[in-house]
């Protein structure tokens, strides 16, 4: 027992020393902390913010000028709340809560640290109505790329059945799927889109079986969103069914059947936030990434030979959304 | 509405999906059955599965050898089981808490190794479906039952073997005796700790195998938290199955078939909210559990560490 107390004591001292080194001492560096619900390399939602912050760091002159830390896999909201509070009390300039489920804890934490700027996504709510002034909001108009992907799916399907694997019918995922369905209907009114919401962001086995179900129902083109779709992409690959991805580039998982991916690039939004923070505005503004501001873009898989007319239609559709000629709801 | 579900295409689809989905539950659940029949509750199944899944995936990714991957998964699973046995049998720790500890350990370690050694989600070519000669030519059902990958067949073959070992062999008799009345077994010269060590280690090996059935046979990917709660459902299925391999099979198939059914309900566009559809397997399992538990009594010594008198 005494030995354990000694070990514990050493650990406490160590923790204090380490936190003393970590805190303060920013020395003109801009410091950003990010909390994400899944792993930074999930090829989906968390990957998108990680890729963006790496890009921002390069744009801002590298690690000497711009420092960032990331707490990933914070699927327990209370843990995420503790991490957010920690980073705020360590004086980070910007703390990004990358998950709509973090809104509740952020609303409690942000007023305690009026000099720290927070960002919350994906949402449009900055809590300005509740008198909180130091929270930015950001969201992806993922229905736009969803629509473009849907237009391609509608043209590419021969069986006129298109399957979608989704996590939970809410937020970003619902926007994307709604946009996708509208896109399919626009390019191919005869096609039927079947959707499977599997009730989980992490159940890879069920996502895989959902894809099997779509194929059993005749689908020859599929799409899906969130990190568990890697299971569905595997099934698409085995059955030679085409796949349209979103949130990050999923081509590496199945280079033969991935047609295109809608990529999220949050770096522009983060750079704008940093500019505002440097000018003294710590929150209150809601940002969105769109095809028009290039926060969203379609990345085509060069290894897949997309028919030229479908490619042109997709490009025209994206242009139409940017110019406002096509409105996606 | 019911009519749309009763087409041949849908019924065969549900059967095929259900058989695949049940596979990891069978390995993990039967392994857990051995442990619980000897009196040890291991809640660390999920963690053991994750470690097994990663070990198999990484081995196959590096060597391309599926059999080696399988072997490594079984070995690391057994090692995790041995550690659980040491903590719960030799150190007599509370089984519920130490099991959760092993779950968190497996979750964290598999994620850490994944981040450091793979860095991103990748794929392997795993076990392919093997159509069994003659049997797979049976009209309709042949393709459902006899065109699966090797680890799926293995899971179903395991059920009668496990049942035979538990009920018809001396070893099985010792396991049951140790789980029901360890004092009596001890006085008859059965080494209680040794039997429990064997069953818990065996359970770990099967959990590792369950993990590998996902990562190198059914899904062929590894991702953080790949098992996503499957291991806990496997533990529940042991209770559901009344601590018998055939019961575990019935529970695993029921749960998986209803899950497959709800996928079809959504694909067919039946007017049931998706939130309700995904609840169906869980609700049904709880109902069945309530009914089933009335009939069967758990092993008397379950969760009780054995302390030799005198």
Image (spheres, coloured by chain):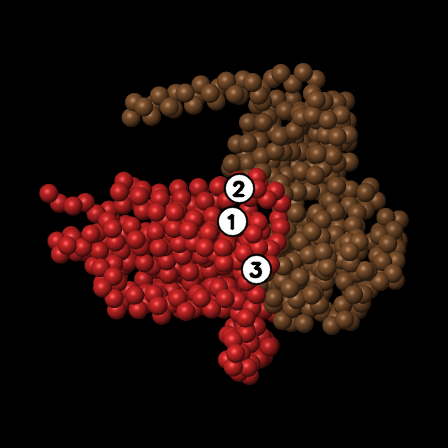
Same chain for the residues at labels 1 and 2, yes or no?
yes
User: In this view of the protein, which residue sits in the foreground, B279 or B132?
Assistant: B132
Identify the chain of the residue marked 1, using the numbered disc in the image: B
Q: Quadrant of the N terminus of chain A?
A: top left
Q: Position of residue B90 (x, y in %)?
A: 26, 42
Q: Quadrant of residue B126?
A: bottom right
Question: Element type at marker 1?
Answer: helix
Question: Element type at marker 2?
Answer: helix
Reading the chain from its start, which is encountered first: label 1 or label 2?
1
Q: Quadrant of residue A273?
A: top right
- Mark 2 and mark 3: Cα distance apart in space: 20 Å
Same chain for the residues at labels 1 and 3, yes or no?
yes
Whether label 1 touches label 2, CB < 8 Å = yes
Residue, disc 3:
B126
| In this picture, residue B166 sits left or right of residue B281 | left
Q: Position of residue A17 (x, y in %)?
A: 50, 18
Q: Is residue B90 visible?
A: yes
Q: Position of residue A9 (x, y in %)?
A: 39, 20
Chain B on-screen colour: red
Residue, disc 1:
B54
Q: Residue furthest bottom?
A: B139
Tell me what residue is drawn at x 48 percent, y 44 percent: B107
Q: Which mark is residue B113?
A: 2
| In this picture, residue B81 sits left or right of residue A29 | left
Mark 2 Cα-neighbour bin, 10 Å: few <14, some 14–19, many ≥20 = some
Tell me what residue is drawn at x 69 percent, y 68 percent: A219
Whether label 2 touches label 3, CB < 8 Å = no
Q: Is residue B218 visible?
A: no
Q: Tell me which chain appears brown.
A: A
């Amino acid at each position: 027992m005494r030995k354990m107390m000694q070990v514990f004591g050493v650990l406490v001292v160590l923790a204090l020393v380490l936190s003393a080194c970590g805190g303060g001492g920013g020395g003109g560096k801009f410091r950003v902390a990010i909390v994400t619900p899944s792993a930074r390399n999930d090829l989906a939602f968390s990957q998108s913010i990680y890729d963006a912050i790496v890009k921002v760091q390069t744009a801002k002159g590298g690690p000497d000028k711009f420092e960032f830390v990331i707490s990933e896999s914070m699927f327990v909201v209370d843990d995420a709340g503790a991490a957010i509070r920690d980073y705020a009390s360590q004086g980070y300039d910007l703390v990004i809560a990358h998950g709509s489920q973090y809104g509740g804890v952020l609303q409690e934490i942000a007023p305690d640290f009026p000099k720290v700027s927070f960002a919350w996504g994906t949402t449009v709510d900055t809590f300005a109505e509740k008198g909180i002034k130091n929270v930015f909001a950001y969201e992806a108009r993922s229905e736009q790329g969803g629509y473009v992907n849907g237009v391609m799916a509608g043209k590419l399907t021969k069986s006129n059945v298109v399957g979608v694997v989704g996590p939970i019918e809410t937020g970003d995922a619902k926007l994307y799927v709604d946009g996708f369905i509208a896109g399919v209907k626009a390019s191919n009114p005869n096609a039927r889109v079947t959707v499977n919401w599997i009730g989980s962001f992490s159940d890879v086995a069920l996502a895989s079986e959902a894809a099997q179900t779509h194929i059993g129902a005749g689908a020859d083109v599929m799409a899906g969103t969130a990190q568990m779709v890697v299971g569905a992409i595997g099934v698409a690959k085995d059955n030679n069914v085409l796949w349209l991805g979103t949130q990050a580039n999923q081509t590496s998982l199945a280079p033969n059947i991935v047609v295109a991916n809608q990529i999220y690039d949050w770096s522009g939004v983060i750079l704008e936030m940093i500019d505002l923070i440097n000018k003294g505005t710590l929150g209150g503004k809601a940002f969105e990434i769109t095809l028009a501001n290039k926060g969203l873009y379609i990345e085509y898989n060069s290894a897949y030979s997309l028919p030229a007319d479908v490619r042109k239609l997709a490009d025209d559709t994206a242009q139409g959304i940017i110019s406002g000629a096509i409105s996606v709801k | 509405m019911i009519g749309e579900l009763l087409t041949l295409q849908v019924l065969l689809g549900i059967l095929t999906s259900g058989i695949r989905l049940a596979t990891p539950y069978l390995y993990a659940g039967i392994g857990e059955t051995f442990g619980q029949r000897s009196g040890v509750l291991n809640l660390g199944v999920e963690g053991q599965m994750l470690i097994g899944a990663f070990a198999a995936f990484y081995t196959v990714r590096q060597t391309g050898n599926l059999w080696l991957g399988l072997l490594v998964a079984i070995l690391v699973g057994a090692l995790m089981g041995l550690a659980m046995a040491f903590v719960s049998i030799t150190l007599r720790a509370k089984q519920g808490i130490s099991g959760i500890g092993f779950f968190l350990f497996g979750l964290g370690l598999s994620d850490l190794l994944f981040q450091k050694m793979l860095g991103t989600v990748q794929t392997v070519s795993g076990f392919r479906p093997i159509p069994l000669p003659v049997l797979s030519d049976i009209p309709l059902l042949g393709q459902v039952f006899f065109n699966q990958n090797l680890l799926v067949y293995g899971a179903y073959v395991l059920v009668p073997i496990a049942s035979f070992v538990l009920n018809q062999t001396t070893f099985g008799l010792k396991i049951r005796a140790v789980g029901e009345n360890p004092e009596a077994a001890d006085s008859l010269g059965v080494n209680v700790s040794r039997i429990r060590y064997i069953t818990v280690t065996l359970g770990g090996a099967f959990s590792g195998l369950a993990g590998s059935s996902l990562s190198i046979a059914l899904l062929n990917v590894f991702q953080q938290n790949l098992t996503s709660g499957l291991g806990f459902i496997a533990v529940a299925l042991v209770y559901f199955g009344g601590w018998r391999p055939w019961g575990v099979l019935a529970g695993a198939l029921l749960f998986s078939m209803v899950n497959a059914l709800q996928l079809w309900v959504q694909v067919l566009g039946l007017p049931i909210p998706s939130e309700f559809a995904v609840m169906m397997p869980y609700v049904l399992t709880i109902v069945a559990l309530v009914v089933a538990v009335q009939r069967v009594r758990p092993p008397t010594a379950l969760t009780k560490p054995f302390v030799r008198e005198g």
